[in-house]
Image (cartoon, rainbow, N blue to C red):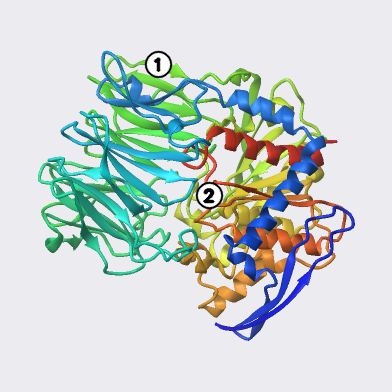
Amino acid sequence: MKKIFLTLIILISCNQITDYPSTPKEREYFNLFGTTVLDPYFYMENFQSEKVLKWSKEQNKFTEKYLKDSKYTQIQEKLSEAFSSEYFSISYFNEKRDTYFYNSGIEQHNLFFLKGDEPSLLLNPNAWSNDQTINLDQTSISPNKKYLAYSTSDGGVDWRTVKIKNLTTGLDLVAEISEVKFSNIIWSQDSSKLYYHKYPKPEEGKRLSQQSYDAALYYFDLTSMKEFLFFGEINKEENYKLSFIGEEENILIKVITGSEEENFYLYGPSIETLEAITPMNEASFNYVHADDEGIFFITNYEASNYRLVKVSFNDFELQEIISEKDLALKGVAFVHNLMLADYINVDMTSKIVVFDENGEEDILKFPSEVTGTISNFQESGEDKILFSVTSYTNPQKYFEYDLLNDDLQMVWEEVIPGYNPDDYVEIATYFTSKDGTQIPITYSYKSSIEPNSRTPVFLYGYGGYNISIRPSFTPKYVAWLEMGGVLAVANLRGGGELGKSWHDAGRLDTKQNGFDDFLYASKFLEYKNIGNRKTTVISGRSNGGLLVGATLVQNPDYFGAALPAVGVLDMLRFTEFTEGWGWRGDYGSPLLNQKDFARNIKISPYHQLKIDECYSPTLTTTGRRDDRVVPSHSYKFTARLQEYQGCNNPVLLYDAPRAGHGSGNGVAMPKWKRVKLFSIEQAFALKHVSS
């Protein structure tokens, strides 16, 4: 890439309508495949610089000032209440499990306990920092029960630090393991070694932005208190996931390139004897179980909707166990010599089909009265299983099912203060997109209201990376629903809800399909007299942030409000940061490939903004420590949109300090930060979509 750099600085005058903070603008451009690309906010890619941080803080102040006359306080109070429910992890109810998580409702993070006559508190993340932004990720107790390994995240970043606690003394070992990312933590059977996935240490000042290459598997030896390379340093683009199979601890390594779905597995009794046991990078394989004869994988190899196969230890031949069906297979749980297969039903909920150990459909039928997204299957006693159920309007419930007696008992349900799930309806249906394709959508609202053309609608979408958005409850939307709004979730092409073909229909050259689907979801709701385009706020995160940004730019001043969050908004330069180079399976490599460049520049929100166009009210949100989709995407997009906005509609930014890419759990940020972020988003939305 030939780059021309000029440093003429211009200050944009304060907007006469909304008086935005002034934003420096640099005359900078570069040439790609004969096209000159203007990039006046390129300097914001140095997003930790004093200049950019000062600008970001001023934007936050401006946003908070703008929302002073909104329903922010009312929403914040409602969400604070909704996030104060008591919580038990499902392992609390399983006599075979030694540990569990618990929250009384007042803790910012869940507490981690060891079971016993008197439960013992092992980890309290709430005490690790004054603002509760050092967060617990994974936990793993050694087989000999002497050690607890756990990983932490500092301020929401993807980087993890692994610590080891001596359970006898209650003290952490002096050694800490850093540079761990996208990793499980797994013990050897003799409890002498701890294995994990890590990267080289980034350059000084580039920890949140440097491209992530050269990952490898390492282990920490508790005997020598030293770290050793286990496997890797072969291909700089590969990532690995380690499992041990059987009592002999044979090695199984999943090899992934970037975020591409295609992968392969290596297997053998030692590193020296590893060999590929699945086709290499032809399809997706995901390990789910092993027995004395072989290893089970869910795969889309020669099966767009996925199937269960078994690779034999004897000859590594691939044998089909559960054949492909009309519905997409998303998981298989092995319990009590049965296989419980989780398919995505036509209404996006779980359809559980029971098979015997030979792959024949069993006479046992899963209880039909259980509806929603069903997960967390585990053996809990002789001929009994535990599992959880949730939906958009129903908080988590745990059930125990007695297989022999066909007896179903609810053992726990989450009670959300101020919220009664019986007061809501959840409707799943399909709508017709631009090209005639039928797209799933689910919408929910309070049964005491009758939606009409003035009803506020919160429309959420994702549509990428073969990720399936399934019905699941979150307190995030309690205030919106309680205040009479509609929550709608569209299952767009690019996701995985309808199998591999659904993913392929919304990536690379077909990426526009997902944007069209999202627009037509809004049109469908308006046609049904459920709000209208001006009472609809569109929302999405990460790839969904791109979705919202592109839909906004392609349909100026169409929606009541837009909330692109942690979005990939510069579709040319995303490859230059952290894992962005690995997103080529969905986005391509626009700086290296002319075809990818030509496609991406047409859909890139940052590059497709037009001077003096009127755009819908927009609040872009990001995390200041987001090291996955770096915050410069949101900064650059906001700066240019503020500059180009041709009408009175506001363009705001909220940049959450000491927060990273995620928002849905404690690894991302504590409750109080989630409540603040969600309150800001929804207050902004209601300010513009309420009649």
The crowding category of the residue bearing disc 2, from other C-alpha atoms within 10 Å (few below 14, some 14 to 19, many at least 20), is many
The location of residue 622, given as percent across then percent down, is 61, 51
The crowding category of the residue bearing disc 1, from other C-alpha atoms within 10 Å (few below 14, some 14 to 19, many at least 20), is some
The residue type indicated by label 2 comes to His
When asked about the image quadrant of residue 688, the answer is top right
Residue 13 seen in render: yes
Residue visible at 79% across and 64% down in the picture: 643
Foreground label between 2 and 1 = 2
Q: CA distance from mark 2 to mark 1?
A: 34 Å
Residues tagged 2 and 1 counted as in contact (Cβ below 8 A) = no
For disc 1, the marked residue is 411
Residue visible at 26% across and 57% down in the picture: 217
Quadrant where the N terminus is found in the figure: bottom right
Please report whichever mark, 2 or 1, sits nearer to the chain's N-terminal start.
1
For disc 2, the marked residue is 661
The location of residue 626, given as percent across then percent down, is 53, 53
When asked about the image quadrant of residue 23, the answer is bottom right
The location of residue 212, given as percent across then percent down, is 41, 63
Q: Is residue 366 above or below residue 324?
A: above
Element at label 1 = strand
Quadrant where the C terminus is found in the figure: top right
